[in-house]
Amino acid sequence: MSTGHSFGFLRATTLLLCALACIPALLAAQSPYHIVDRWKIGGEGGWDYLLADGPAHRLYLSHGPRVDVVDTTTGKPAGSITGLHGTHGIALDSAGKYGYISDGSGNAVVVFDRATLATVATVPAGTNPDGIVFEPATQTVWAFNGRSQNATVIDVATQKVVATVPLPGKPEFPAVDGQGMVFDNLEDKSEIVRIDARSKTVLGTWPAGCDSPSGLAMDKAGHRLFPVCDGKKMSVIDAQSGKLLANPAIGDGPDAAGWSAAHSLAFASSGDGILSVVDASAAGYPTVESLTTQRGARTMAYDPVADRIYTVTAEYGPRPDPTPENPRPRPAVVPDSFTVIVIGR
């Protein structure tokens, strides 16, 4: 074999080996999501939002009067923040030092040390703080108070309230663009409110493009918002103009959304036990997967480091008979059935 032929053979062999090595990654990127594990947490009480800290391999779960912390490498409990009243959401600062919990029934934001999980401050908020988010450009935490219809703004350097921002409706879940803009769903108005974090003023509202928006995710690089709504709809909103781009179909009763920048996918978790996956890179924003999870798994968190989705639910007892005082009673949660559903590819 001549030198030229030898070089050509070696080059072709190298290219073939490189192509074969890439196949598993390509298949993983194109394969559907599926349930890969279930972590039983147990305990009693309801739940709301959860938050994944990918670099630290932690998952924070609001769980009644506490926040449970799970090690995502093992699925085992790593501790809890206790002594709260009725938790809703969790936010983390960019320094890796503190976390913030919206304690709705306590009308406060509880600050905890992420190394020890010890509470370091309790900051008074408005009435029933619900959605909460860290805004990196101003180094502030925004707690959105559902009943008083305002936002409590906390300076992370001092752990003090620096502003209370009135809102033109009932806030739900927030999102930030990383450049000083805060967005939040207004559930009762079916709108999205825009807030300048630096001036701490409301700039205006846009139609959400669907009814009663609850969960909200954001594509920061692409300037797109993904509110999830009643009527089995997600909206795709241009975050610079407010233009409605699409209305993909999702499950019924959603309460959270997620975004994968690496794969250009938007997610919605819904109470009917469906995780919807929307391809935001394709024309028309098609729903490419509707994964059956479990009834009640309405909230979720996405971990971009592991490309994992976490959702939580529990088993339910029989539904009580309706009464005039409670015409639509909810079934009780079976004690010790609280579970994390782990979804991956």
Image (cartoon, grey):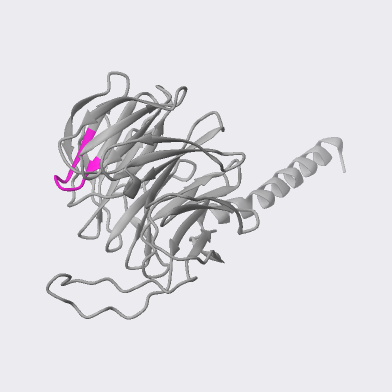
Q: Quadrant of the N terminus?
A: top right
Observer-nearest residue: 45 or 199? Answer: 45
Question: In the visual, does 275 lie left or right of 21?
Answer: left
Observer-nearest residue: 67 or 209? Answer: 67
Q: Is residue 217 visible?
A: no
Marker count (numbered) = 0
The residue lying furthest to the top in this view is 199
Q: Quadrant of the C terminus?
A: bottom right
Q: Name above or below for residue 236 compared with residue 255.
A: above
Question: In the visual, does 62 lie left or right of 331?
Answer: right
Residue at x-position 86% and y-position 36%:
3
Observer-nearest residue: 66 or 252? Answer: 66
Q: Is residue 160 visible?
A: yes
The residue lying furthest to the left in this view is 324
Task: Tell whether position 83 is magenta.
Answer: no
Q: Position of residue 210 (x, y in %)?
A: 18, 50
Q: Name above or below for residue 321 compared with residue 11.
A: below
Q: Name above or below for residue 334 compared with residue 344.
A: below
Task: Specify the quadrant of the image occupied by residue 180.
Answer: top left
Residue at x-position 70% and y-position 49%:
16
Residue at x-position 27% and y-position 71%:
330
Question: In the visual, does 32 lie left or right of 129?
Answer: right
Task: Specify the quadrant of the image occupied by residue 195.
Answer: top left
Q: Position of residue 278 (x, y in %)?
A: 36, 53
Q: Position of residue 113 (x, y in %)?
A: 55, 37
Magenta stretch bounds: 185-193
Q: Position of residue 110 (x, y in %)?
A: 43, 40
